[in-house]
Image (tube, helix red, strand yellow):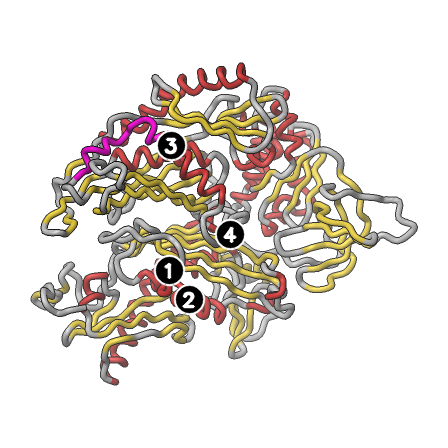
């Protein structure tokens, strides 16, 4: 049974360890607007702020460089650091768009990045990070049909930034916006497939 | 939704296209809602695409300016509210807000849209028309949205009665006399192309901007913004386009003032 | 306010605008109305028209205010120059707005889970587009919806409403006219989960019993306000697919 819960609403009598909840008087309450799945015991936020985790893939823009440390803007709140060592062959300029993986979470708004590479050309789209899982889809189904049917290169960052290059960029953007708006509904994968096929 | 890379926008333009398949000289969807604020003597909300502005008119009794003793006053102010964009800060009006207000003011004043002489009450007092433009959400082209909002709000403004030293609002307050309608069209240069009604992403990529205010027969105000330059040919062409847009925009204001 | 020329505020057991003593003015809320803000809400409460918006969490400005253990909250309550019937407000901060901004900030500092966003700043803006008594309570009620729609972790959906005393009568949600001539005026913000009071201001005169009764009236009215707030958020997720 799935239902939308609002902040302050009771999720369970008893302590459940779930993100986006808090404990009060040994009961668990929702802290954000989310979809609660009773069987699976999960709370998926419908709106929210992205908090980084090790291993997540991100897309960001280089904002400054000093002493071989690059600062990369991932969201308004979270910053990534690329620390070049003398073996690094990569070299970036301020304004470059890069993809990378989070290797360390120093604190909630600062991470260290590894496996970074430059993304040339293309555009950056910013959608709400909570909607990104829907863009990827279960078993990558959604992202695969997006790249197949638009012919575009699409790199999705868990931080909400998406890089799109070549192919039918306009169509890719429209589809991504639609996914963001309808992320909470069912049958979305099929509807997006139809939209992409009709407008190829 | 933010489209950050300006390079892509310029690329699109070189092939004659804009995002969302908009024409080079096409306005986004314009929505005008009137009389939204009951405490103001006139009010209008204008949306151009996602740009949202609100204009409120307050009629105040004051002394006339010493150099225009038999005329009322007309003052436009603008605030770029911090709610409108992450880039707007709390504080006194920024140079952009001041420029916005002054450019809109100039176009409407130069067009003699308000009969200021009709605002005289007696030897010592006149009506002052204070128009405050509140920018609620920024997505480009505040000049055109602002001019449309101010012009529409003025066309819906009723003048209260001034009796026994007090301002009194009644059911049959007379409308403010509007003699002329001014509209504005703002163009911006991206790469080698010039487009009408830039949205936020296009404005972040533009090199130069030109706002043209007309009343159908005359150009009433011009304001070039940012660095860059326009050739005279380009300007003349833009003025033509501006006149062609006049009727379209004027109809929208007229429809509102009749309701 | 002087009691000469005091209008009749209570006529035959009803208020001048036809309401019962415990009746709220009509309340409508629309969430997510501004595209750029992280969260937003537009609220109409009687003749009040209020816009609330939330930005952040984001970098702290100026940097030296950063608290590495938690978020700092900034709040700005502001009245538009065209918001009042009787005058043109000059723009710029005034002392009343500064105080109100502070007490509202204190409400939300209590309710936002600050430790979730260390080293950041969360900005809450409340713009009064039209005022008719109870603008600070309307602002808090709208800001709570804006915060929820931004997905910022909060303990509860807070609401606020005022109680007042007109002559012998205890009333809820006074409009500007009632406010001006009341014998006591008390805006209150509540976390409905445990009926905790997060904002309390009063001036005038209440007996102990009157105070108790007023709180009961506030909690009762609060249930209706909470329902409307929740409805406005759920509406954002009404199924789009057909």
Q: Which sits in the foreground, C61 or C206?
A: C61
**Which residue has dot 1 on it?**
C139
Seen in the picture, residue A158 relative to C12 is either above or below; the reply is above
Dot 3 falls on which chain?
A: B
Callout 4–callout 1 Cβ contact below 8 Å: no
Asked which secondary structure carries label 2, the reply is helix
Disc 1 and disc 2 in contact, CB within 8 angstroms: yes
- Magenta stretch in the rendered image: B108-120
**Percent of width and height locating residue B66:** 26, 41
| Residue under label 2 | C104
For residue A57, side relative to residue C140 (left or right): right
Disc ID at residue B89: 4
Position in image of residue B39 (x %, y %) = 25, 49
What element does badge 3 sit on? helix
Q: Is residue A52 left or right of residue A196?
A: right
Q: Pointer 1 and pointer 3: residues touching (CB < 8 Å)?
A: no
Quadrant of the image occupied by residue B192: top right
């Amino acid at each position: 049974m799935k239902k939308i819960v609002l902040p302050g609403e009771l999720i369970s009598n008893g302590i459940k360890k779930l993100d986006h909840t808090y404990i009060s008087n040994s009961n668990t309450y929702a802290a954000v607007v989310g979809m609660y799945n009773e069987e699976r015991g999960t709370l998926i936020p419908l709106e929210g702020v992205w908090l980084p985790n090790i291993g997540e893939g991100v897309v960001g823009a280089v904002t400054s460089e000093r002493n071989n440390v690059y600062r990369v803007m991932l969201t308004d709140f979270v910053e990534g650091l690329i620390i070049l060592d003398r073996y690094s062959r990569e070299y970036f300029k301020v304004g470059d768009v890069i993809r990378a993986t989070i290797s360390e979470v120093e604190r909630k708004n600062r991470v260290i990045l590894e496996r970074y590479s430059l993304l040339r050309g293309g555009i950056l789209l910013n959608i709400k990070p909570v909607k990104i899982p829907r863009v990827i889809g279960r078993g990558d189904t959604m992202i695969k049909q997006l790249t197949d049917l638009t012919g575009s290169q699409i790199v999705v960052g868990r931080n909400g930034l998406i890089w799109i290059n070549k192919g039918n960029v306009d169509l890719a953007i429209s589809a991504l916006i639609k996914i963001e708006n309808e992320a909470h509904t069912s049958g979305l994968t099929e509807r997006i497939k139809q939209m992409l096929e009709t407008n190829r | 939704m933010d489209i950050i890379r300006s390079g892509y926008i310029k690329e699109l333009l070189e092939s004659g296209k804009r995002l969302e398949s908009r024409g080079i000289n096409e306005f986004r969807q314009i929505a005008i809602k009137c009389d939204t604020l009951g405490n103001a003597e006139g009010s209008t909300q204008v949306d151009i695409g996602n740009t949202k502005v609100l204009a409120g008119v307050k009629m105040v009794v004051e002394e006339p300016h010493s150099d225009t003793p038999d005329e009322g006053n007309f003052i436009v102010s603008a605030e770029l509210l911090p709610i409108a964009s992450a880039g707007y800060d709390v504080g006194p009006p920024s140079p952009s807000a001041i420029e916005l207000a002054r450019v809109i003011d100039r176009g409407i004043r130069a067009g003699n849209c308000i009969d200021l002489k009709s605002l005289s009450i007696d030897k010592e007092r006149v009506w002052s028309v204070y128009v405050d433009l509140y920018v609620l959400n920024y997505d480009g082209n505040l000049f055109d949205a602002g001019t449309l909002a101010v012009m529409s709000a003025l066309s819906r403004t009723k003048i209260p009665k001034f009796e026994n030293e007090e301002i009194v609002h009644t059911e049959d307050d007379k409308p403010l006399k509007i003699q002329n309608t001014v509209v504005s069209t703002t163009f911006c240069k991206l790469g080698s192309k010039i487009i009408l009604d830039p949205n936020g992403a296009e404005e972040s990529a533009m090199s130069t901007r030109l706002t043209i205010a007309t009343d159908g027969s005359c150009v009433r105000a011009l304001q070039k913004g940012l660095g860059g330059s326009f050739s005279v040919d380009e300007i003349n062409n833009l003025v033509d386009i501006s006149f062609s847009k006049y009727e379209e925009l004027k109809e929208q204001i007229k429809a509102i003032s009749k309701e | 306010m002087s009691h000469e020329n005091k209008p009749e505020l209570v006529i035959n057991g009803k208020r001048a605008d036809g309401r019962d003593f415990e009746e709220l003015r009509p309340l409508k809320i629309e969430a997510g109305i501004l595209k750029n803000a992280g969260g937003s809400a537009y609220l109409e409460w009687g003749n009040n028209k209020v816009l609330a918006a939330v930005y952040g969490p984001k970098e702290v400005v100026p940097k030296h205010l950063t608290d590495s253990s938690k978020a700092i909250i900034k709040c700005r309550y502001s009245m538009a120059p065209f918001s009042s019937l009787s005058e043109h407000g000059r723009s710029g901060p005034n002392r009343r707005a500064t105080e109100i901004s502070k007490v509202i900030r204190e409400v939300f500092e209590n309710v936002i889970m600050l430790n979730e966003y260390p080293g950041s700043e969360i900005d809450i803006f409340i713009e009064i587009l039209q005022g008719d008594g109870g603008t600070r309570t309307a602002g808090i009620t709208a800001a709570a919806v804006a915060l929820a729609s931004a997905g910022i972790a909060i303990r509860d959906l807070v609401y606020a409403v005022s109680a007042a005393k007109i002559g012998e009568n205890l009333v809820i949600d006074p409009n500007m006219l009632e406010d001006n001539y009341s014998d006591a005026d008390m805006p209150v913000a509540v976390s409905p989960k445990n009926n905790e009071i997060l904002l309390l201001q009063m001036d005038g005169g209440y007996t102990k019993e009157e105070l108790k009764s007023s709180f009961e009236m506030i909690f009762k009215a609060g249930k209706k306000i909470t329902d409307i707030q929740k409805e406005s958020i759920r509406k954002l997720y009404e199924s789009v697919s057909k």
